[in-house]
Image (spheres, rainbow, N blue to C red):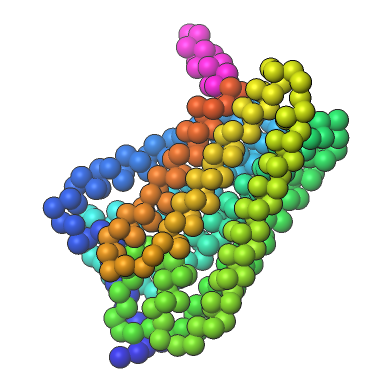
Amino acid sequence: MVNQSSQSVFILLGLSDLPDSRISLFLLILLIYVATLAANLLIAFLAISDTHLQTPMYFFLVNLSFLDIFNSSISISHVFFDICTGNRLILFSTCISQVFFFSWFLSTGSLMLEIMSYDRYAAICHPLRYASMMSFDFCIQVVLFFWVLSFVCSSLHTLCALRLAFPDPTIVPGLFCEIYQLIQLSCSDTFLNYLLLYCNCAGFGVTGFFITLLSYVYIFKTVLNIKVKDGRQKAYSTCSSHLTVVFIFYGAGLFNYFQPKTEDHLAGRLMSLFYTVVTPLLNPLIYSLRNSDLKRSLQKSLCRRSTRP
């Protein structure tokens, strides 16, 4: 039986087929989610409250922190509902909303990592021109452009998904609804959907990754020419955290979406759980542990609070 998308019954597989591990999974995911909220909000608070951190790099980092919070919330919202109630049914409106918001925030996050690499390139390769290259007005305009561009592309994906027809019922083998899964499950012509998907992956994923790598090629060439050892170490330390986050973001994403297809849906769901839940927690931890400015800002904030009467 085939129905229009708005009339089809959607069943989200989630983790409900693991009844023996329901309580432990719920507690583990809840712990990771709370830690993700706390870590990302802490970075945002420090970057906003400390005047020494009000620079372009931390402005982009605050945006990335909120994107991590949004993506994590979208991906596990129905997982909590599934584990607590055992109800795997999901409305198509909820499913398509997850597709739209996850695609929007994921694309914006990719662009944010790209502009952060350009910021490091400008700071290390053109230090005398850095203030003019990364002015406050430029940063605001770039971030707004990224949010709007990702919004438009995600809207196109969503509108094209609304025209698809699905079997009734439709079993979605994942933790939440993603555009790639819906296209694979559709019974109608999906040529336009695949075309938009590949263009989106090429524009936001592949192109962004190579632009980031190109920026770091120039950065490392400049760093190798620095004769002072302390100067090289400082340059490496300012780039290592961002480069680590870039490889985790793209590496986990490529493995999640391009892993060999098998009948073991559980392995794919666990990888999706890592990509959407664990990765947003790793990002702030990496920036916190490998960034001396954030450490000093946190220490100053704790000292101020401890000295208050």
Q: Is residue 66 above or below residue 144?
A: above
What residue is drawn where x is 54% and y is 78%?
A: 193
Can residue 132 be seen here? yes
| Side of 152 relative to 197 (left or right) | right
Dominant SS of magenta comes to: helix
Q: In this view, does 8 lie above or below 308?
A: below
Q: In this view, does 304 lie above or below 252?
A: above
Observer-nearest of 287 and 213: 213
Tell me where residue 254 appears, x and y as whole percent: 49, 57
What residue is drawn where x is 37% and y is 88%?
A: 3
What residue is drawn where x is 44% and y is 45%?
A: 279
Extent of the magenta region: 295-309
Tell me where residue 296 appears, x and y as whole percent: 57, 18
Tell me where residue 133 appears, x and y as whole percent: 82, 40
What residue is drawn where x is 54% and y is 41%?
A: 245
Q: In which quarter of the image is the N terminus?
A: bottom left
In the image, farthest residue toward the bottom: 1
Can residue 62 be seen here? no
In the image, farthest residue toward the left: 20
| Side of 144 relative to 178 (left or right) | right
Tell me where residue 246 appears, x and y as whole percent: 56, 45
Observer-nearest of 141 and 17: 17
| Side of 191 relative to 38 (left or right) | right
Which quadrant of the view contains residue 169? bottom left
